[in-house]
Image (cartoon, grey):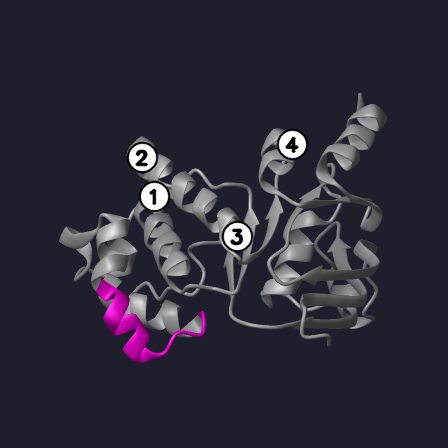
Amino acid sequence: MNNNIAIKLTNISKKYILRHEKPTLVENIFRFRKQEEIWALKNINMEIKKGEKVGIIGDNGSGKTTLLKIISGVTFPTKGQIETKGRVAALIDLEAGFHPELTGEENIFLNGMLLGMSRKEIKNKFKKIVEFSGLKNFIDTQFYTYSSGMALRLGFSIAIHSNPDILLIDELLAVGDQEFQQKSYKTMQDFFKKGKTVVYISHYLKDVARLCTRAIWLDKGKTKRSGLPKEIISLYNNTNY
């Protein structure tokens, strides 16, 4: 892969099997079940350069989140090859990678190492992670006692402080209370201004036009158009409205 490329997707396809009803005993014995194949992505070819800010747009069900999950390694393609260069952090499912029986502190080390951080790096950034999350009074309690909002705040803080080369965002997430949302939104805006590679899914097309250098329009699992954000958004809007 070219040194200037951060993400390369080659003929990426993803298939899901939907089973519509619980199989009967006879169907289990003879392995006959009513099922449907859904191709969430079909032959996606894409190169994203280092430092690019790419916005992925499209209708619900077009394959946007599946694409991000494949890039992040949360799920694997049915066909095709993916290459990434550098540390990847994904703001998709912020509660993933936590163990309910471990404390917040222990989960910071667990989650941080899953994101590619060394133990020494996590130790050096530990106070900043806790301070940003606002969970100092709960950091030594078990994770299962956390509310979903607390879990999301901790996950967001760890991901941001992992200092990724590639940041994947499924919407600018509304995490925690209003104060934390404002802080997280500002942090995300700062990321867009840095020389990081960002892939951003959003239905807020004004954000894509303002923050991104390129837009890719997905439609029914395929790449329909790619180009300057304002041009692609205009084509998308004219097709849908």
For label 2, count other residues whose C-alpha is less than 10 Å away and answer few (under 14), some (14-19) or many (20+): few
Above or below: residue 235 compared with residue 8: above
* Residue 87 placement, left or right of 27: left
Say which label, 2 or 3, has the lower sequence index. 3
Say which label, 3 or 4, has the lower sequence index. 3
Q: Could you say which quadrant of the image residue 35 lies in?
A: bottom right
Helix, strand or loop status at disc 1? helix
User: What's the distance in space between the residues labelled 2 and 3, CA to CA?
Assistant: 19 Å
Helix, strand or loop status at disc 4? helix
Quickly name the residue at label 2: 177
Residue 222 on the magenta span: no
Foreground label between 4 and 1: 4
Helix, strand or loop status at disc 2? loop
Quickly name the residue at label 1: 149
Q: Are marks 1 and 2 in contact (CB under 8 Å)?
A: yes
- The image's mark for residue 92 is 3
Quickly name the residue at label 4: 205
Foreground label between 1 and 3: 3
Q: Are marks 2 and 4 in contact (CB under 8 Å)?
A: no
User: What's the distance in space between the residues labelled 1 and 2, CA to CA?
Assistant: 8 Å
| Residue at image point 47% right, 41% down | 173
Q: Position of residue 18 (x, y in %)?
A: 75, 54
* Residue 98 placement, left or right of 77: left
| Highlighted magenta segment, given as a residue range | 115-126
Q: Position of residue 192 (x, y in %)?
A: 52, 48
Disc 1 marks a residue whose amino acid type is: Gly
Above or below: residue 164 compared with residue 152: below
Q: Are marks 1 and 3 in contact (CB under 8 Å)?
A: no
Closer to us: 19 or 205:
205
